[in-house]
Amino acid sequence: MVDNKVINIHEQWYSILGEKISLIEPYHYVKLSKIFPPPKLPASRKNGTVIEVLPYIRQKVKMWGADVLRAENIKTLIEEVDDVSDEKFSDVESMNEDQDFLQNKNKLSRFDCIASLLASSECTVTQDIFRTLSQFPIAFPLIIPGLVDANKFKVLLPLLIGPVIKWEMKPGTIIENHLFSDPFKMIVAVRIGANSLGKSTILNQLMTSDSMFSSSCEPRAEYGIPHMVSGSVEFTG
């Protein structure tokens, strides 16, 4: 039971997860492990960033500290100071290389973190993680790309229907929500055109929490769009 099973990652996701990732089974999720300090990834690093923060995020979820996945908090896991000497940028001949460097900066995304966490968890662990995350103002993946096959997607709907979501709307008032059951309502946004301010930016204006959906306006979005967001669907209850 103590031997972790691994998931072989499709090469398309190597840059954020590497070649393999451990499957999170109930035994490993429940077992108390050592306490991980918040990671501080250099802003210049791109490869393998999500895999480095997953142990810390999983620990926070287990300790009901999943607010680390809010947009304003996920950016604190990256060092603001680049680990590159000033000499590199003083060389005029390396200007083109500098542009490539800037485009390849760390693209750590909370959506990538949540999607990778759920995609690498056994189904009962996924449900438990979801029960915890649902207590926080976070958008969840409904459709995520498969880690093994880049041409396939996972639909999480079967795992999300069962749990009853409860939260305290105000002191003494507990609200229950049965996801995707009557009278559950869903607002759907569809992109039309190529405007830089898309559907997620508009939906965020309706939310009580800033940057609930992954968008071009959330903190550190200037470092690029999330790796795994193409073809994925986010929702909130």
Image: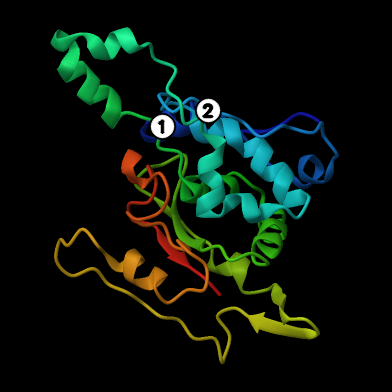
Q: Which mark is residue 132?
A: none
Q: Residue at x 76, y 83 (%)?
A: 174
Q: Which residue is mark 1?
A: 106
> Measured from the top left, where is residue 76 in percent x and y?
55, 40
Quarter of the view holding residue 149: top left
Instruction: Please state which amino acid type lies under the numbered disc 2.
Output: Leu
Q: Secondary structure at mark 1?
A: loop
User: Is the Cβ of the residue at disc 1 closer than 8 Å to that at disc 2?
Assistant: yes
Quarter of the view holding residue 214: bottom left
Instruction: Please state which amino acid type lies under the numbered disc 1.
Output: Asn
Q: Earlier in the sequence, mark 1 or mark 2?
A: 2
Using the image, determine if residue 185 lies above or below residue 112: below
Q: Which residue is mark 2?
A: 41
Q: Secondary structure at mark 2?
A: loop
- Viewer can see residue 23: no
56 on left or right of 29: left
Using the image, determine if residue 78 lies above or below residue 222: above
Name the image quarter holding the N terminus. top right
The crowding category of the residue bearing disc 1, from other C-alpha atoms within 10 Å (few below 14, some 14 to 19, many at least 20), is: many
> Measured from the top left, where is residue 128 in percent x and y?
72, 59
Using the image, determine if residue 20 lies above or below residue 136: above
Q: Residue at x 55, y 80 (%)?
A: 180
The crowding category of the residue bearing disc 2, from other C-alpha atoms within 10 Å (few below 14, some 14 to 19, many at least 20), is: many
Quarter of the view holding residue 222: top left
Using the image, determine if residue 201 lies above or below residue 55: below
Q: Nearer the viewer, residue 233 or 87?
A: 87
